[in-house]
Image: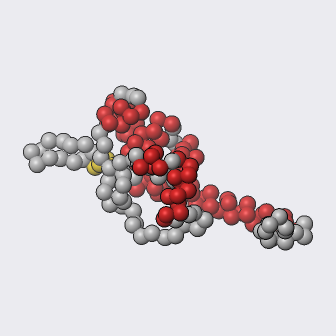
Amino acid sequence: MMSTAKAPIVGLPSGKKALQENEKKWGVDLLKAGWTMLPNTIFMRQRALGLDSLDINILLILLSHWWHADNLPFPSKKTIADAIGCDASTVRRRIQAMEAAGFIKRIERRHDNDRSNTNQYDFTGLVNEASKLAKEELVAREEQRASKASRIKRKGKPLLKVVEGKA
């Protein structure tokens, strides 16, 4: 599915420092109770992806069960429906639509006696599509940074960070 190689992300606190920052924001108890990572691009660009708020809520529940890249989540549609306050048939239809759009791939699981179990969910399609939008955002950010640097240079101001109130 996805590479498990960890590349450093520039500008983000890592490890213990990131945990401490999140504890400051949310408190220890909330974090101990569980948390879910969702890249900003997925919810900030949901319209560009063709998702709506119900789809995002369903994704949040699915992703809250996805702890390791190689261990896909498999919550029941009833679990999802109960969490977001809708009918399981609504969840089923929305998951089908996200699958048709290529964002989710349902993987059927069966018991030995050929009975169905809850589906697993693969998010490779969502990751790929959101990554395209993320690359666009990164290019736009770099263009904005370069434009700002150019404006500052034209005004004759140095590009130094402010240190103790001095430029």
- Residue 88 in the image: x percent, y percent? 33, 31
112 or 159, which lies in front? 159
Quarter that holds the C terminus: bottom right
41 or 50, which lies in front? 41
- Is 72 situated left or right of 114 in this image? right
Observer able to see residue 73 = yes
Instruction: Say if 7 sits above or below 108 in the image.
Output: below
- Is 75 situated left or right of 50 in this image? left
Instruction: Say if 143 sits above or below 56 in the image.
Output: below
Q: Quadrant of residue 141?
A: bottom right
Numbered disc total? 0
Q: Residue at x 24, y 47 (%)?
A: 108
Residue occupying the far left of the picture: 113
Q: Residue at x 65, y 62 (%)?
A: 139
Observer able to see residue 100 = no
Q: Residue at x 90, y 66 (%)?
A: 155
| Colour mapping | secondary structure
Quarter that holds the N terminus: bottom left
Residue occupying the far right of the picture: 155
- Residue 165 in the image: x percent, y percent? 83, 64
Q: Quadrant of residue 152?
A: bottom right
- Residue 106 in the image: x percent, y percent? 31, 47
Q: Residue at x 36, y 37 (%)?
A: 80
